[in-house]
Image (cartoon, rainbow, N blue to C red):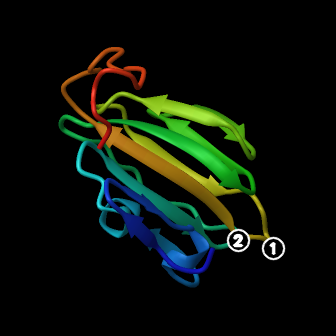
Amino acid sequence: MTETTTGDGWAVGSIDAMGEGPGFRKVRRELDVKAFGVNAVVMPPGYASGPHYHERQEELYLVHRGEIEFTFGDEDAVVLGPGGLARVDAATVRRFRNTSDSEEAVYLCVGGADGYVGRDGRTVGDEAPR
């Protein structure tokens, strides 16, 4: 997939098609996500972010490519590889570091506030689909 494609009620795309080189890929904007924030971040080899936290937004991180060290608070650190997940409370200070000296690392970050909506899936039948 090389470009974002949209239809009636859906959109598909690719992290690699959303930009080149290190930096943020604005997934929410590109796919028109409305219910939560979502970005992908491409980290150059050896890159370490500064610390940050949020006022309201809990975040979930998914390591897509490479190996990333997540540090929470002052000292709790874990290294996650592809498929690794980390959930972080809004007020928890977090930092990230690409552990590789030669390869980019990529992670997806999903953030939101105000809670889970519950199970609201429905089977198709009597109701008209969108």
Q: How far is the residue under mark 1 from the one under mark 2?
A: 5 Å
Name of the residue lying farthest toward the top = 118
The secondary element bearing badge 2 is classed as loop
Q: Can residue 26 be seen in this view?
A: no
Q: Where is residue 57 in the image (x, y as percent from the top left)?
A: 26, 37
Q: In this view, does 114 lie to the left or right of 62?
A: left
Q: Residues within 10 Å of mark 2 (few under 14, many from 20)?
A: some
Q: In this view, does 78 lie to the left or right of 48?
A: right
Q: On residue 45, which mark appears?
A: 2
Mark 1 or 2 closer to N-term? 2
Residue at 46 percent across and 48 percent down: it is 109
Q: Where is residue 87 in the image (x, y as percent from the top left)?
A: 48, 30
The secondary element bearing badge 1 is classed as loop
- Disc 1 target residue: 102
Depth order, front residue of 74/3: 3
Q: In this view, does 12 lie to the left or right of 97?
A: left
Residue at 38 percent across and 52 percent down: it is 38
Name of the residue lying farthest toward the bottom = 20
Amino acid, disc 1:
Ser
Residue at 78 percent across and 63 percent down: it is 100
Residue at 41 percent across and 44 percent down: it is 110
CB contact under 8 Å: marks 1 and 2 = yes
Amino acid, disc 2:
Pro
Q: Position of residue 105 (x, y in %)?
A: 68, 62
